[in-house]
Image: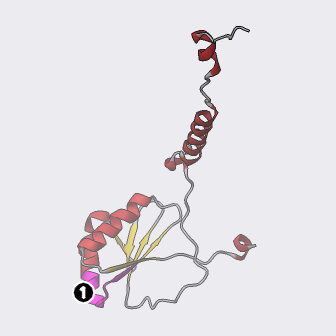
């Protein structure tokens, strides 16, 4: 009996490269990146000012109160003030009342930039603590 030896081309056909684990790893990476990617722009978020159900009542007689309308009009302790004069008004009121706490009450439709500008002006005027006032949700919102 003659012994048959395998040719080189037959030996090459026996070795296979198994790509299944590599394909699985690629699909796992694809799924990971798809789930961690943000698909919605942050500028499309609808944000409204928060409601507070439980809060401590603050004594507003000795505090600095700043109200901001939805048009950006400012009122410091009942007096209408322009944004350019806000730092001076807050500093005078801070000295007069002896309070370093500012309570900001802004309309739900107020642009965020007006509130941030007012906070920066308050910091420049020497205000040490800034609180943002919220409202209790109405009974129809909670049910």
> In the drawing, does residue 93 fall left or right of residue 18?
left
Instruction: Give the x, y percent position of residue 17.
Output: 59, 26
Q: In which quarter of the image is residue 125?
A: bottom left
Q: Residue at x 29, y 79 (%)?
A: 127
Q: Residues within 10 Å of mark 1 (few under 14, many from 20)?
A: few
Height in image: 19 above or below 138?
Answer: above
Q: Quadrant of residue 87?
A: bottom left
Instruction: Give the x, y percent position of residue 140.
Output: 73, 72
Height in image: 107 above or below 30?
Answer: below
Q: Mark 1 points at which residue?
A: 95
Instruction: Give the x, y percent position of residue 115.
Output: 40, 65
Whether residue 100 appears in magenta in the rendering, the answer is: yes
Q: Which residue is drawn at 68% across and 11% down?
A: 3
Q: In which quarter of the image is the C terminus?
A: bottom right
Q: Quadrant of residue 28?
A: top right
Q: Which residue is drawn at 31% across and 85% down?
A: 100
Q: In which quarter of the image is the N terminus?
A: top right
Write down the region rendered in magenta. Answer: 92-103
Height in image: 2 above or below 60?
Answer: above
In terms of depth relative to the viewer, which is nearer, 60 or 133?
A: 133
Height in image: 130 above or below 68?
Answer: below
């Amino acid at each position: 009996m003659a012994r048959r030896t395998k040719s080189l081309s037959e030996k090459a056909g026996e070795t296979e490269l198994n790509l299944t684990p590599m394909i699985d790893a690629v699909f796992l990476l694809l799924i990971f990146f798809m789930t961690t990617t943000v698909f919605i722009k942050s500028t499309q978020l609808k944000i409204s000012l928060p409601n507070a159900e439980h809060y401590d009542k603050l004594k507003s007689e000795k505090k600095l109160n700043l109200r901001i309308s939805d048009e950006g009009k400012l009122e410091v302790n009942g007096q209408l003030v322009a944004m350019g004069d806000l730092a001076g008004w807050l500093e005078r009121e801070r000295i007069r009342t002896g309070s370093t706490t500012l309570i900001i009450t802004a309309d739900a439709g107020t642009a965020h930039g007006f509130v941030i500008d007012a906070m920066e002006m308050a910091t420049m005027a020497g205000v040490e603590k800034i609180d943002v006032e919220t409202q209790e949700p109405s009974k129809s919102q909670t049910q």
